Amino acid sequence: MKWKPYLIIIIPIFLLGPFIGSGLAIIGFDNYTHQMYLPAQEISQNIEHLEKSISSLHRNAVTVSESAAELEREYLQQEQTLEQLTSISQSQKDLSDQIYEDRIMTMLGSPIDSYSSDKVDIKVFKLDELGYRGYIAKVKLFDPSAVKVVLGQDKLGSLETTSSVVTRTGAILGINGGGFFYSNNQVLPLGNTVVDGEFVTGFHPSNGEVFFTGISSDGNLIGGIFQDKESLTRLNPQQGVSFLPILIKAGKPQEVPKEWQITKQPRTIIGEYANGDLILIVVDGRQSDWSSGVTLERLQNKLAELGVKEGYNLDGGGSSTMVFKGQVLNRPSNGKEREVSNSIVITG
């Protein structure tokens, strides 16, 4: 038959077909596997690179953490060092202040009386020199508001003794204040007077040697000759009075007018030490059996001897009065207190 030769060829092909298909499938799978292998290799490399990056970040994080800890340790160490230096500096300042205080006390001698509170510390001393006598009060201010200028009867144009003002206001210490004069039967304070930061009669340019002195808002003694209000107000005066002349400025004695140089009179002085302590002095006079008074030049020398850096001459004569704890310490020249336009008091 003519189909026999073809059957001989076809039959083996049918018999081998499954095996041929399997072979072809295996070849195709191998190709696919090879294609898959290449991306897997790349992924593996990427993972390895990522692991290295993470490891590096971890090391950096540890380094940053260690650096931060080190910085914190250094900061704390520096802070401790600063605190130690501040403490040492404060201790040295306290020691320096104490040395200066001891020096002042050595020059003034032993106090005859004292008063201390959270606002002020006051020590009172006798002043007994050849030819004159008086009293000194050293005032250490803790609160600037303790210093007050008080008008007589608390109103312009009125007079009142310093002891009355001290009693009325409950003050611990008081001295007479600035000068005053009569005009049209009215009493007016000389120059500028400041009470609680206000000019009582407005601002008046200094006339000749007339100065203003008082306490600033921060408790310092201020003073000088002022021709314009701005020059004075920039010093923030809270309390103050006027008279003449200036005795010591910045530690240097000032020239005293000739008419004041050789005249012995009762005196009232306000001044300041370099450490900010106030010094108030009242000298008796016109009493030959007690005290003849003192010239301003001699008083200048005494202030310099005591180490005073600022010194201002206040109203003197029969006005000179010092009151402490309700008692008049000195002996006013008229045998009794004179009523004055204003007084300077220290409250407790």
Image (cartoon, helix red, strand yellow):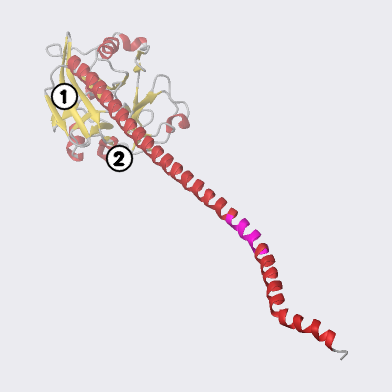
Residue 318 falls in image quadrant = top left
The residue carrying pointer 2 sits among few (fewer than 14), some (14 to 19) or many (20 or more) residues within 10 Å by Cα, namely few
Residue topped by disc 2: 155
Number of the front mark, 2 or 1: 1
Q: Secondary structure at mark 2?
A: loop
At 26% from the left and 13% from the top, the residue drawn is 299
Give x and y (percent) for residue 24. Answer: 71, 72
Which picture quadrant has residue 272? top left
Residue 157 shows in the view: yes
| Percent coordinates x, y for residue 148 in the rendering | 27, 35
The C terminus lies in quadrant: top left
Task: Give the distance between the C-alpha atoms of the residues marked 2 and 1, in whole angstroms.
Answer: 30 Å
- Residue 306 at x, y percent in the picture: 24, 14
Quadrant of the frame with the N terminus:
bottom right
Q: Is residue 161 visible?
A: no
Q: Does residue 295 belong to the magenta stretch?
A: no
Residue that appears at 33% across and 39% down: 196
- On the image, the x and y values in percent for residue 95 come to 24, 22
Q: Which mark is residue 98?
A: none
The residue that appears at 61% across and 60% down in the rendered structure is 40
Q: Secondary structure at mark 1?
A: strand
Query: Residue at left 13%, top 19%?
Result: 110
Range of magenta residues: 35-44
**Which amino acid, by three-letter code, is at mark 1?**
Val
Say if the magenta span includes residue 40.
yes
274 or 153, which is in the foreground? 274
Q: Amino acid at mark 2?
A: Lys
Q: Main secondary structure of the magenta part?
A: helix
Label 1: which residue?
Answer: 124
In-front residue for pair 8/179:
8
